[in-house]
Amino acid sequence: MTTFSPKKLLNLNTLLVFGLAAIAVKWLGLFGGEAGNEVLIFGLSALAIIPLAGLIGEATEALSSRLGPQLSGLLNATLGNAAELIITIFALSEGLTELVKASIVGSVLGNLLLVAGLSLLIGGLKNGRQKFDQRQAGMNATLLVLAFMALAIPSIFDVALVDVNAQDAEILFSEGVAIILIVLYALNILYSLRNSPEHTAHESSHAPTWSTRQAAGVLALATVGIVIMSEFLVGSVEPVVEQLGWTEFFVGIIIVPIIGNVAEHLVAVQVAVRDQMDLSMTISLGSSLQIALFVTPVLVFVSLLFQNKLLLVFNVYELIALSAASFITALVALDGESNWFEGAMLLAIYLILALAFFVLPGTVAIAH
């Protein structure tokens, strides 16, 4: 889980004013022009989600520090990606399943390439060659490759199911894989707790400053805030696509993941600069595993409540990106040490993929 400093949190909280501005524009009808309003609302709500996600992380850390390791691990697993989970649930309710699948892929790419890349680059420039727990990193790297395969298999076999128009079988296949992934993630938490007693889920560089009641209150209010801002954000996606010329695919795979995870991203880089690479790698690799093994299966079952069901069927461009990110990050992590040039390589791949997704037509991106 993340570790937030009071100074960092204070700086992030200044962005909460954008949430008030988004509410004023959305509910009070400030500024003329419907399409212009929607684009403005998208930007304001996106900026407001950043500090709200940070508050959820800080509150979760404060609560975790007062729980046993088992409950702490469960709490972190549930709330570690709360902001993005809420955003994607609203997207599912609007029938934007392709945007949701793109955001799942984008979150994994962002953590493995952008966050890890920045952490290795800046941390390496500041501290030189850095080392981290090779065994834990290797375990996470192996799980990443396994998670990629688990997401790729339904996509490959779906071709045969589509040919025979077996929609019920498609849904059953995705649900079955989702159950297996959740069980695997639970086993991963159990294994980590039993075999790493020296590292608890509430590893922190400072003592918690909030009481349990304060943390629970902040968690509740921040969650409500993210629910409101997520509704604004998702509701303005289509006007943004039309006005700015972006595709829904690009918004999902690049923009939404950065918005939902930027607070955690900043923490990973910060601790890398302090030469705490174990924690930095745990944030980047662990968050990717959380998205692939926990958030994605949860979204599959949540989608059953809506008309458009979420199938674990990704297009070829998403699978290529996932495979590249998973395997190169695994290679970087296996030796237990890092340097700034490895970070530069990861960033280069992310930028190339981001450019490819930007120029890729939306109609091509959703073709399986």
Image (cartoon, rainbow, N blue to C red):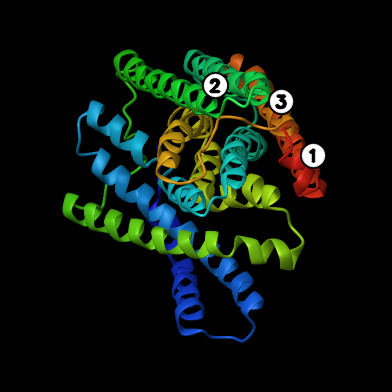
Identify the disc placed on residue 324: 3
Say which label, 3 or 1, has the lower sequence index. 3
Left or right: where does residue 79 sit relative to residue 41?
left
Q: Looking at the image, is 130 positioned above or below residue 298?
A: above
> Which label belongs to residue 115?
none
Q: Residue at x 61, y 36 (%)?
A: 105
What x and y, as percent, mark residue 184?
A: 41, 18
| Residue 41 in view (yes/no) | yes
Which secondary structure, mark 3? helix
Q: Where is mark 2, residue-wise? A: 147
Horizontal and vertical percent position of residue 258:
58, 49
Pointer 2 or 3: first along the chain: 2
Left or right: 198 in relation to 322: left
The vertical placement of 42 against 330, above or below, is below
Q: Is 85 in front, or is 200?
A: 85
The residue shown at (56%, 40%) is 273
Q: Earlier in the sequence, mark 1 or mark 2?
A: 2
Question: Type of residue at label 1?
Answer: Ile
**Mark 3 and mark 1: Cα distance apart in space:** 12 Å
**Tag 1, which secondary structure?**
helix
Q: Label 2 sits on what residue type? A: Ala
**Which residue bears the numbered disc 1?**
352
